[in-house]
Amino acid sequence: MDSLSQHTVISCQDLSIGYQNKKKVAVIASAINFSITQGTLVALVGSNGIGKSTLLKSLTAMLAPLSGSLQIDAKEITAYSSLELSSKLSVVLTEAPASKNLTVLELVSLGRQPHTNWMGKLTQNDKDIIQQALEDTDLASLKNKNCFELSDGQLQRVYIARALAQDTPLIILDEPTTHLDLYHRAAIVKLLKKLTVEKNKTILFSTHEIDLAIQISDKMLVMTPQKIAFDSPCNLIKQGAFDVLFPNEIVVFDKKTGRFSVT
Amino acid sequence: MMVQKTYTRFFILLSLLLLVLVCGNISLGSADIPALEVFNSIVGSSSKSSWQYIITNYRIPKAITAIIAGGGLAISGLLMQTLFRNPLAGPFVLGLSSGASLGVAILILGAGAISGIFGTFLLGPWSLVIASALGSFLVLLAVLAVTLKVRDTMAILIIGLMFGSLTGALVAVLSYFSDAEQLQQFVFWSFGSLGNQTWRGISIVSLCFFVGLLLSIYSAKSLNALLLGENYAKSMGLKIKKNMLLLILATSILAGGITAFVGPIAFIGLAVPHLTRQFIKTSNHFVLIPAVAISGAILMLVCDTIAQLPGTVYTLPINAITSLIGAPVVIWLLVRKRKLIF
């Protein structure tokens, strides 16, 4: 396991991201450098509008990088076909699925799509993986419920289960803890942690729960207007990365407790 | 997608119901023909040649047209609801039928301008289908293009309505400049009618239906993925553009082809997928497509049987009956569930 966990899953070198059309280029962030090894839980934090979503869109190939290198499994992300990429990377998005009439089992089973034939026929192997994904997310008892019957916390677990069923080494989640209460936020982040430890998944998630992220994640990406810092939470605290996260007239970061407090 | 249980029993029941309705539909009509004679006419040994003629040249073709039109419009409604992520989508609501009308109007009313032999050649059944399918394809493409810019499900309906009005206005302008005979031909077409189809016409609609059905079944896996939204579908390796193009092609062949022959028919496309979802609790399109097709055929046969006003000499326009049944069904579903889900 040790040698495996040194494997680099995703790496950026001098990456610059943003939006581009015929007339102009809008750079959101540049000089992004980091590399994430297998089995790591990485939290992406930053204030609103700093470009977290843009970074996630670039990392999930929904947006082409402006310049620099962005590699997944030592291959440029732009060189993947969407089908190839779908066996490397699965996503949990903030947008709700278009249809909530699906049952939990149906929605999770959809994660097997990249691996099934044109009819979407599930082999025994597919069914085992789906069952495992349901058990890992504690959903086995809810599998025949329709999605519109579920609570937000349960729904979030369903989306994570779908990503697990897709069976990719890397999972990227966009704000999986929004709309949840403290208990369920912690439950989701603990679930992600468990998946990195037990399943050796590499997980990157964006969040506004900085306290929670500091406590539980292995590495953190801290986006500030000046730069994007990437390190373990302890080192980031020492470097003072969180002190510049927000303008400090309203909230300040307490290095001792690892928390923000209102001034 | 995992099918938890087989729907064999549901499909057998549905098929039996369809069979019963076909028999009922053929037996009932303006002329009162005894059931035994109906059977004799089908096997070709009726005692009265007029009955034989009515059965084989009028009622059977009409029943076949009803099955194909109902099934095809229902599938096209299902495809559009998933494609546009909108429970209120349907060929009539999104202006597909209006697009088809415009195509047909240009053909029928414009044919006068190119008079003579060429004009009559233009009015063959194939050109009608092509004009109609092309009209709905263009409207669908336009609606889709706008929806890619405006990502609001309510806006899609409004855009569909606007395109409907726009094509309606163009048809009105065309009607104003055309002569009475062509106008009459067009007006009769726009009432919608399942009857008076030639066998050649029926074989062309059937061809459209089967091409549309095959394309839909081929697209069923991507339709299932699209239930999660475009971004999720793409993250699972789906080629969005290619699959969307296939879907609008299937929809316009189905809705356009059928509308060319039977005229614009409202509510079947919108109501049938929702009615079907009341009976089967799955969103898997491999199950939904055949289920919706059979249910659409059943509802259309019921509407047609009512339109015949059995025992009287009157026949009501089919479009009026589908609206009379379809509109309350949609309202009832909305009130009961408070929300239409797809």
Image: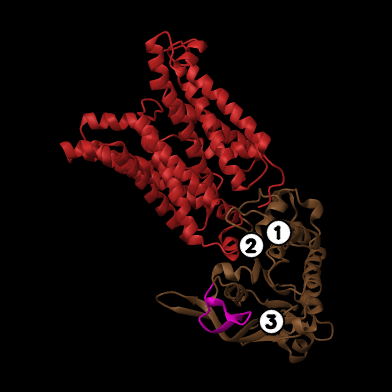
Callout 3 and callout 2 share a chain: yes
Residue A78 is covered by the magenta coloring: yes
Q: Secondary structure at mark 1?
A: helix
Q: Which residue is mark 2?
A: A115
Distance Cα–Cα, label 1 vs label 3: 34 Å
| Left or right for A138, reference B17 | right
Q: Could you classify mark 2 by the number of other residues whose Cα lies within 10 Å: few (under 14), some (14-19), or many (20 or more)?
A: some
Residue B154 location (% of width, % of height): 52, 50
Residue sitting at x 74%, y 91%? A239
Q: Going by the image, does B181 lie left or right of B24?
A: left
- Could you tell me which residue is drawn at 67 percent across and 55 percent down? A122
Q: Report if the CB atoms under discs 2 and 1 are less than 8 Å apart.
A: yes
> The residue under label 2 is which amino acid type?
His
Callout 1 touching callout 3 (CB < 8 Å):
no
Furthest toward the bottom, the residue is A239
Q: Residue furthest top?
A: B47
- Residue B214 lies, in percent from the top left, at 49, 46
Q: Which residue is mark 3?
A: A221
Q: In the image, is residue B17 above or below residue B242?
A: above
**Residues drawn in magenta:** A63-79
Q: Is residue B200 above or below residue B6?
A: above
